[in-house]
Amino acid sequence: MTTSTLRNAIVVVSGLPRSGTSMMMAMLAAGGIPPLTDNIRAPDQNNPKGYYEFERVKRLPEGDTAWLAEARGRAVKVISALLTHLPPEYHYRVIFMHRHLAEVLASQRAMLASQGHAVDEAEDTMLAAAFKRHLAQVEAWLAQQPNMQVLHVHYNELLRNPETQLARIDDFLGGQLNVQAMSSVIDRALYRQRMPETL
């Protein structure tokens, strides 16, 4: 993909919440792709390096899509549940983040607990099954979209073998990224919910 092609495309970072989407946004920003973010959601103990969110993304189901014109050539975070609301008249390069579901659920529980919400670990099996169904549906939908090219990146593999994964991302986005700067964003100290994939 040429630099001019990238300028006309919208780079979408997607996946389940707590799957590494914020880290990927930070990496792309360091690599040279400006993020579309309004900084309304401030960094906190759950995401000390920031969330890189753009509030209007949440209004996609209501038809708020005018902002996408300014997203071309930039990266924007769109959780997997909202991908199907992206209008077809734009071209998207989607980096879809995956993470072991046990870790996703543990991270979500930790976030809820830090916000004072009650958590019930007994619901994990049910939630894991729902997440698996959702991911299968979204991936099947993505595969049928002619205006979307998708790169699947596993958060755990990115931390385990960053050089290989960063090379894949750089190639997917045209080969012009500052891979060394992207690598410096990875902070293994923030990998706090580590466990085998049991769900």
Image (spheres, helix red, strand yellow):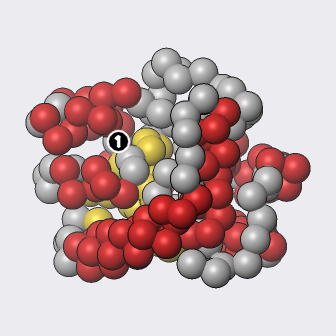
- Mark 1 nearby-residue class (10 Å; few <14, some 14–19, many ≥20): many
197 vs 85, left or right, is right
Could you say which is closer to the camera, residue 4 or residue 126? Answer: 126
- Whole-percent x and y of residue 146? 20, 72
Horizontal relation, residue 37 to residue 168: left or right = left
Which of 122/147 is in front? 122
Residue 27, how many percent across, how many down? Answer: 67, 48
Expressed as whole percent of the image width and height from the top left, the position of residue 150 reads: 40, 70
Q: Position of residue 86 (x, y in %)?
A: 21, 50
Q: Secondary structure at mark 1?
A: loop
* Residue at 64% in and 57% down: 106
**Image quarter (top left, top right, bottom left or bottom right) of the N terminus:** bottom left
Above or below residue 153? Residue 83 is: above
Left or right side of 2 for 83: left
Residue for point 70% across, 70% down: 156
Counting labels gives 1
Out of 146 and 120, give the one closest to the viewer.
120
Instruction: Indicate whether 51 appears above or below 156.
Output: above
Q: Which residue is mark 1?
A: 72
The amino acid type of the residue labelled 1 equals Arg
Residue 183 occupies quadrant? bottom right
Write the residue at 73% across / 31% down.
45
Q: Quadrant of residue 135?
A: bottom left
Looking at the image, residue 149 lies above or below residue 199: above
Query: Considering depth in this image, is 188 or 112 the residue closer to the camera?
Result: 112
Residue located at (22% from left, 65% from top): 147
- Figure quadrant of the C terminus: bottom right
The answer to whether one can see residue 97 in this image is no
